[in-house]
Image (cartoon, coloured by chain):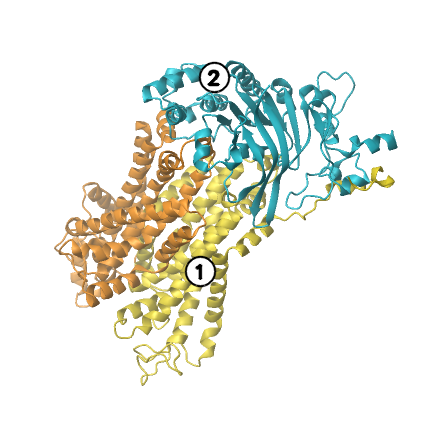
Chain colours: A cyan, B yellow, C orange
């Protein structure tokens, strides 16, 4: 399968009055056409910054992309584009859904207008045609009576309905890539499932590739084919859903898995929180960023940052526990 | 590859508290705000100017032997010179002394206004929002009424009633000036009231007084501080305005407003009589505003990044 | 929506009634009586005058009469100008004040909006600092200092514009400018804050994620939403203009209401003070009522929410 997106060694920093915060510290991953990739991790691990950097939505200053490339559709490096060029890609080639549907829609503009804006901008549709298209989109995302709803304002919609509208907006021009930044975090649990089902359904219909950012592993298992686990601005492990859920190798991934409830577990398992706090990215620790919280930390972890190594096919991770010397010495 | 040494792969033994160790000491909200404020050159300039003006207001009159009301009939309308540093007015009174006395009075009025804000405005707003319902409704109606009479008009009415003077101006502020503070605190408390920790405190049986003073007001504190840096100049301004209308402090006492309106009257012939009070007055206003803006940027979460 | 307007209207009436009452109580607790100043009057003459003005009646009767008169639109007879009714004075001198006020409001809102928008779009750049500095200077120099300086420089020394009086369009410029200084600052600051709020909001991010150009985002999404709250500054601006006219009319010798008010204070003309206070308050209440309604109409959130309950 062809790659729609190739992120290579991406480094993003923020300049604050306290110093340089290294939010993303060398992230590389690929996304295949038609694939759903999940990026998981705690708050502040850099997953949102990564996704918004792909969209080039993070204002500069204070942020800068220090290094790396984001190759889109095999030919365009998004990092090198001017803002003007990026504008023609946003919304048409890449769509985005945000976390909080309550604040992500313009309160003083009708839903219809907010959906058609992108269509008029990118596809040059006339108002009437765009209007028709918007009605179609609304029914596609499962909003009843789209003809009347289109003339209404955001506050007349519930949270779940607003997120559906957001999805309609982001998919209006049938983008090749959809980035969903915690699309269910702000919603009720019952609505969460509906939105995920809708995304799955639409993904099949439209065939967009999806990057879904979340800290909800349930969502990951439900929708994604591959998972990227991020910690302190780096990828610590990535692989297929099965790799991550059944053959996880990184202590942080173990920690994440232990901190959720599992129904399929026969053994009496208890929830184990990951102790401690993520490190301060103003001054990242010298060794492995997770070492301070890692129950298996070794001397080397405190001094040397582990390299990413491939375990099998698509499964890779960065941890000294997998070092060959480790195997020979301890086991 | 790092040099391989055997002990590299030995698990580290950790103390229990080590996991909680964070590389940078966490700083509190107020420490952070202070750091932000210090970074703001304009706000700090405002702060130091105010400090300087206050110092002069306290010490300035002592640097000259004249009282603010002593008339030197042989030295009327003098230019600034070595005896009278800022010159004299038409009664031969030392303008240096009068200027710093005036600053004292203006600052005093400003500080009294700030106290009123704290005593009346904060409590009024806090109580109104905390109890809500009927009480809030009634208290808001009252505020609306007072708000509909321009503040200056009420002050003028009171001056007509009680005669002019510092205390009338302060009293007038006590009746009406704290309204914006009360509104602000009410808004803040209303939104804070919904927060879980306040609900928790309520359900644990904390008394209303305790919740208002221990939970709500400390959390609204940053907004209160910002408001006060705007209250003080506003009160000083009002006094100046009243002085111009001849309703300010009583002669021979001087306030900045009075010196200004005296100065305006004689500016074509004796420009220095306007220059110095105008300079100090405007500097004071600009400083308060810069400091207020800086505080807002530093304290208001909305403006923080 | 209609119920919302109706409710606001009732509030307005109640507020107005309370103001009338408060003013009445204040004025009737004054030390001495309005004729105390005229030493020439004998006790009998005073009694006669008191009778004429109804001051010998019990206070409840006076209050009742006063309310009835106000309902009829009568604010009584001036003490200082016994031949003139307060309403007459208002009718005669308010137009000049109103014109001055409206001119200065238009002027200050226009300049204030431009300054505020510039400052927000160039946030933390020199344009921002420059615009905000102008705004701060505006609130730092009292109009009674600025007015005479302008009057002297522009009017007398350079002779570009008339220095005083109220004869032609050129006479309007200096007073309106003086009066605008404060309100420009108020509008500019409010607009800046409002713009910054909107610029940092999530829906602007959404708009950017749609690929709209910077220009159309500012025009269609930012400005519209940022200007809405600006309607609410009309209240404070009106207060400023009202109090400003007291001084500005004095400086530029404009035959307006503010001048009368100041004179009334000097001469203890109680009916005139009372009448003008009530009039000014009514003006302010009406402006705030209209602002509320206008805001309700422009903002769909309020328009629809208020329409339902």
Q: Mark 1 or 2, which is nearer the eye?
A: 2
A192 or B273, which is in the foreground? A192
Marks 1/2 in contact by CB < 8 Å: the verdict is no
Could you classify mark 1 by the number of other residues whose Cα lies within 10 Å: few (under 14), some (14-19), or many (20 or more)? many
**A285 left or right of C239?**
right
B64 or A122, which is in the foreground? A122
**B90 left or right of A75?**
left
Element carrying mark 1: helix
A316 or C20, which is in the foreground? A316
* Residue B229 location (% of width, % of height): 46, 55
Q: Is residue C38 visible?
A: no
**Residue at 28% in and 51% down:** C241
Q: Is residue A301 above or below residue B97?
A: above
Q: Is residue A31 visible?
A: yes
Q: Quadrant of residue B103?
A: bottom left
Chain assignment, label 2? A
Q: Is residue A223 above or below residue B172?
A: above
Furthest-bottom residue in this view: B74
Could you classify mark 2 by the number of other residues whose Cα lies within 10 Å: few (under 14), some (14-19), or many (20 or more)? many
* Residue A93 location (% of width, % of height): 48, 25
**C47 left or right of C136?**
left
Residue for badge 1:
B287
**Residue at 48% in and 67% down:** B52
Chain assignment, label 1? B
Between the C-alphas of marks 1 and 2, the distance is: 55 Å
Residue for badge 2:
A141
* Residue C201 location (% of width, % of height): 46, 36
The quarter of the picture where the N terminus of chain A appears is top right
The quarter of the picture where the C terminus of chain A appears is top right
* Residue A12 location (% of width, % of height): 58, 40
C208 or A263, which is in the foreground? C208
């Amino acid at each position: 399968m062809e790659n729609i997106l190739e992120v290579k060694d991406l480094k993003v920093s923020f300049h604050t009055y306290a110093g340089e915060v290294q939010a993303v510290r060398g992230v590389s991953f690929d996304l295949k056409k038609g694939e759903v990739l999940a990026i998981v991790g705690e708050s502040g691990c850099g997953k949102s910054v990564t996704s918004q950097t792909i969209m080039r939505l993070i204002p500069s200053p204070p942020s800068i992309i220090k290094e790396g490339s984001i190759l889109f559709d095999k030919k365009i490096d998004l990092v090198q584009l001017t803002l003007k060029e990026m504008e023609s890609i946003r919304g048409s080639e890449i769509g985005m859904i945000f976390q909080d549907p309550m604040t992500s829609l313009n309160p003083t503009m009708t839903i219809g207008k907010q959906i058609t804006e992108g269509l008029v901008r990118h596809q040059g549709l006339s108002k009437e045609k765009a209007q028709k298209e918007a009605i179609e989109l609304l029914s596609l995302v499962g909003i009843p009576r789209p003809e009347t709803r289109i003339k209404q304002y955001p506050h007349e919609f519930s949270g779940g309905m607003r997120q559906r509208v957001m999805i309609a907006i982001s998919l209006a021009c049938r983008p090749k890539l959809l980035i969903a930044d915690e699309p269910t975090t702000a919603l009720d649990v019952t609505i969460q499932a509906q939105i995920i089902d809708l995304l799955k359904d639409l993904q099949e219909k439209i065939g967009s590739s999806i990057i879904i950012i979340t800290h909800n592993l349930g969502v990951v298992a439900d929708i994604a084919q591959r998972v990227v686990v991020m910690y302190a601005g780096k990828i610590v492990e990535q692989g297929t859903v099965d790799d991550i859920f059944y053959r996880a190798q990184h202590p942080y991934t173990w920690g994440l898995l232990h901190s959720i409830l599992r129904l399929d577990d026969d053994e009496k398992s208890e929830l184990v929180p990951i102790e401690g706090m993520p490190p301060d990215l103003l001054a990242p620790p010298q060794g492995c960023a997770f070492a301070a919280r890692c129950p298996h930390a070794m001397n080397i972890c405190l001094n040397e940052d582990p390299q990413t190594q491939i375990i099998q096919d698509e499964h890779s991770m960065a941890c000294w526990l997998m070092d060959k010397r480790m195997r020979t010495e301890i086991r | 590859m790092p040099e391989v040494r055997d002990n590299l792969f030995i698990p580290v033994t950790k103390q229990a508290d080590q996991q909680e160790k964070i590389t940078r000491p966490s700083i509190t909200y107020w420490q952070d705000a202070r750091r932000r404020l210090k970074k703001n050159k304009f706000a700090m300039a405002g702060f130091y100017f105010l400090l300087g003006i206050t110092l002069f207001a306290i010490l300035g009159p002592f640097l000259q032997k004249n009282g603010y009301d002593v008339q030197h009939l042989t030295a009327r309308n003098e230019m600034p010179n070595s005896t009278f540093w800022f010159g004299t007015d038409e009664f031969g009174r030392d303008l240096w002394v009068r200027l710093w006395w005036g600053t004292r009075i203006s600052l005093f009025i400003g500080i009294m206004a700030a106290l009123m804000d704290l005593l009346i405005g904060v409590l009024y707003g806090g109580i109104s929002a905390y109890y809500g319902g009927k009480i809030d409704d009634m208290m808001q109606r009252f505020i609306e009424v007072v708000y509909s009479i321009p503040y200056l008009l009420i002050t003028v009415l009171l001056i007509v009633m009680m005669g002019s003077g510092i205390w009338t101006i302060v009293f007038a502020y006590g009746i009406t000036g704290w309204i914006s503070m009360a509104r602000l605190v009410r808004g803040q408390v209303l939104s804070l009231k919904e927060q879980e920790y306040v609900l928790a405190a309520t359900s644990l049986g904390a008394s209303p007084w305790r919740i208002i003073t221990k939970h709500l007001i400390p959390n609204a504190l940053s907004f209160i501080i910002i408001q006060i840096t705007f209250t003080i100049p506003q009160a000083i301004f009002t006094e100046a305005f009243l002085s111009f209308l001849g309703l300010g402090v009583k002669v021979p006492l001087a306030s900045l407003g009075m010196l200004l309106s005296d100065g305006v009257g004689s500016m074509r012939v004796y420009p220095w009589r306007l220059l110095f009070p105008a300079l100090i007055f405007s500097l004071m206003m600009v400083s308060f505003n810069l400091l207020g803006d800086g505080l807002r940027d530093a304290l208001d979460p909305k403006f923080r990044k | 929506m209609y119920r919302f307007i109706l409710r606001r209207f009732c509030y307005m009436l109640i507020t107005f009634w309370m103001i009338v009452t408060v003013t009445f109580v204040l004025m009737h607790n004054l030390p001495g009586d309005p004729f105390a100043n005229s030493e020439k009057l004998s006790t009998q003459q005073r009694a006669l005058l008191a009778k004429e003005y109804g001051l010998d009646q019990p206070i409840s009767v006076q209050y009742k009469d006063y309310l009835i008169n106000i309902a009829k639109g009568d604010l009584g007879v001036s003490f200082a100008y016994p031949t003139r009714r307060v309403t007459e004075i208002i009718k005669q001198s308010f137009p000049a004040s109103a014109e001055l006020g409206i001119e200065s409001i238009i002027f200050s809102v226009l300049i204030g909006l431009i300054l505020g928008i510039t400052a927000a779009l160039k946030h933390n750049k020199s344009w921002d600092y420059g615009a905000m500095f102008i705004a701060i200077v505006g609130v730092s120099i009292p109009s009674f200092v600025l007015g005479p300086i302008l009057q002297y420089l522009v009017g007398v020394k350079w002779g570009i514009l008339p220095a005083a009086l109220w004869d032609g369009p050129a006479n309007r410029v200096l007073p309106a400018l003086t009066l605008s200084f404060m309100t420009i600052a108020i509008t500019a600051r409010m607009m800046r804050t409002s713009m910054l709020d909107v610029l940092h909001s999530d829906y602007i991010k959404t708009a950017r994620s749609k690929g709209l150009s910077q220009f159309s985002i500012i025009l269609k999404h930012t400005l519209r939403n940022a200007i809405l709250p600006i309607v609410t500054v009309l209240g404070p601006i009106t207060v400023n203009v009202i109090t400003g006219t007291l001084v500005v009319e004095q400086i530029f010798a404009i035959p307006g209401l503010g001048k009368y008010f100041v004179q009334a204070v000097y001469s203890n003309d109680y009916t005139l003070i009372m009448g003008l206070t009530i009039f000014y308050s009514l003006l302010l209440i009406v402006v705030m009522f209209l602002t509320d309604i206008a805001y309700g109409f422009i903002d769909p959130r309020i328009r629809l929410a208020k329409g339902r309950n």
